[in-house]
Image: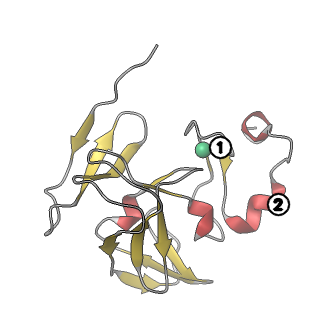
Amino acid sequence: MYQATSTELLSSADANGDLAICFDEEVGVGVVALVNFAKGDLLDRFTGTTGSELTQHSLQISPGEHISDTRFVGYVSHGCNPNCRLDMQRQELLALRDIAADELLTIDYAATEDRLFTNFSCSCDAENCRGWIVGRLDLHKLPQDGSNDAAHRS
Ligand SMILES: [Zn+2]
């Protein structure tokens, strides 16, 4: 049965009124678009504190270098078929496809992170959902037969 997800905004919108931190019943804390974006649009240009520490909400700039205390990007949810991507050199969040107002933003965590602070199971409903989400250096450890979900929970 389809069940609507209620998304509650946790922060006031940013200066442009384009993005907000929210709490979604399915994915927890995330970032939601408040306006429509077109494929290729710049959603956010981010800054933060860089250091060697990997944390729950940090993002990897380069091996051993992580940025934290970003306003939004550290809270963007993972999706295996995401609607956004990060350019870590330019420190930009970009739309991979058209995004409607009220849509949750997603990025593929393995696109930027060598290793995750915590590996986790994913049920994002994408056809290519990997089931178990790890950093890119650990991707080769996943089984190739699509049985990630069950095989890696133990
Ligand atoms: Zn997934």
Q: How packed is label 2: few (under 14 Cα within 10 Å), some, or many (20 or more)?
A: few
Is residue 132 in sight in this rendering? yes
Is residue 116 in sight in this rendering? no
Q: In this view, does 88 lie above or below 95?
A: below
> Which of these two is toward me, 74 or 93?
93
Q: Where is residue 61 in the image (x, y as percent from the top left)?
A: 52, 82
Hey, which quadrant is residue 140 in on the image? bottom right
Residue at image mark 1: 129
Q: Where is residue 7 in the image (x, y as percent from the top left)?
A: 27, 37
**Residue furthest out toward the top:** 1
Residue at x 86% of width, y 41% of height:
145
Q: Is mark 2 on a helix, strand or loop?
A: helix
Q: Say if disc 1 is inside 8 Å of ligand 1.
A: yes
Q: What element carries label 1?
A: loop
Q: In this view, does 114 lie above or below 151?
A: below
| Tag 2 and tag 1, C-beta contact below 8 Å | no
> Ligand 1 lies in which image quarter?
top right
> Which of these two is toward me, 23 or 154?
23
In the picture, measured across the screen, residue 20 lies left or right of residue 138, that is left
Residue at image mark 2: 140
In the picture, measured across the screen, residue 148 lies left or right of residue 8, that is right
Q: Where is residue 119 in the image (x, y as percent from the top left)?
A: 63, 53
